[in-house]
Structure formats: C-alpha cells, structure tokens
Amino acid sequence: MKPIEKIRSKFFLSLLLVFVLALTISCSDQQINSFGLEGRNLVISNEKGGAKANPPIFSAGEVVYIRFEFSEYDVDSNGLAWIQEDISMIRKDGKIVLNKPNIINERIPPPEGVEWWPVHNKVTLPEVIEPGEATIAINVRDKIGGGTISIKTTIEVK
C-alpha cells in the first residue's frame, strides 16, 4: 500500500469514528428505529410546551407532556395522511404498566408549510407503579405509505 493510501484510509476511519461517536452522543437518551418514517426532537416534560425534563424523573400519577416530530409520510389522492400512534410504558422487568393504543388514529391533512409534523400528547402516568426505571415507547404508523417509527426513551419514576 502506498503511503498516501494509508493516510487516506486512516483519515476516513477517523472520520467514521467521529461520526459514530457524535451519533451515539446525540441519541444517547433515546432510541429511534424507523422504516419509511423519520423522527426527531422527542421531549418529555411535566409542563405543556416545557423544556425536556433533565433528569427525566416523574412521579406516579403525574401528567406528562410528550412531543416529537416526524416526516417522510405519504398522503392519499385527497391529500390526507392516515396516522396512528401508540404510547406504552414498560417497567424494567418487562411488565407493561401503561398502554394507549391508537392514541391518534386519524385521516387528516398534514400541516402546511413544514416538513416535520409536530405531535403533542398529554399522558397521565399510572397511579400505582413501583419506583425505578421505565421505558416510554412511542410507535407511529403511516397507514397510507406503510412506514413506521418507534421511539423509546428511559425515565425514572419516583
């Protein structure tokens, strides 16, 4: 291998490592898996429109506000999107303690003039739940285009 090729290889390897590290840091508090849809900017707060709870610690029975954005959805011939959303909360031992299927199940026109569709939810945590870690799982389905997105983040229940 020529010296220039070694330098180029090391450069690209270093660049890849920096990219992976940056991606890991930027997504360290949430996991996003998608097929067709794209998601970003998940915020869980104890105030409507509030800042992201940091650290994400909530009480049993507390009202939490969940917001995020998604894009890459399809519309039908009438210009309507058909979006479904589920929200669940899973304890560390795997037990589902909150299940809100089809919290959104609507055929509606997408918001005008924006690429990312904002979603806002108000959810009351279960009154009786053991303290500790829990995962909030949000699943969105594009019923027209078939795309899905799953967003998960960990919170602490006190």
Image (spheres, helix red, strand yellow):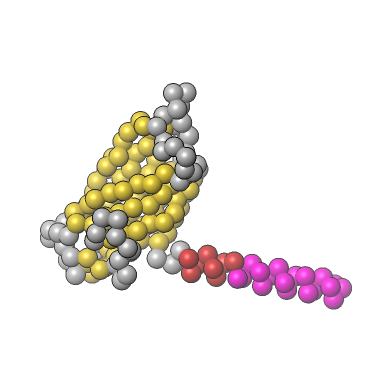
Q: Position of residue 51 (x, y in %)?
A: 32, 63
Residue with the most extreme right position: 2
Residue with the most extreme front position: 113
* Picture layout, residue 133 above or below residue 66: below
Residue 78 visible, this orientation: yes
The residue at the point 52 percent across, 65 percent down is 23
The residue at the point 36 percent across, 32 percent down is 108
Q: Position of residue 59 (x, y in %)?
A: 18, 65
Magenta-drawn stretch contains 91: no
Residue with the most extreme left position: 128
- Quadrant that contains the N terminus: bottom right
- Quadrant that contains the C terminus: bottom left
Majority secondary structure in the magenta region: helix
Nearer to me, 126 or 120? 120
* Picture layout, residue 100 above or below residue 60: above
* Picture layout, residue 3 above or below residue 64: below
Magenta-drawn stretch contains 5: yes
Q: Position of residue 50 (x, y in %)?
A: 29, 60
The residue at the point 24 percent across, 61 percent down is 46
In the image, which residues are magenta? 1-18
The residue at the point 57 percent across, 67 percent down is 20
Residue 143 visible, this orientation: no
* Picture layout, residue 80 above or below residue 39: above
Nearer to me, 98 or 73? 73
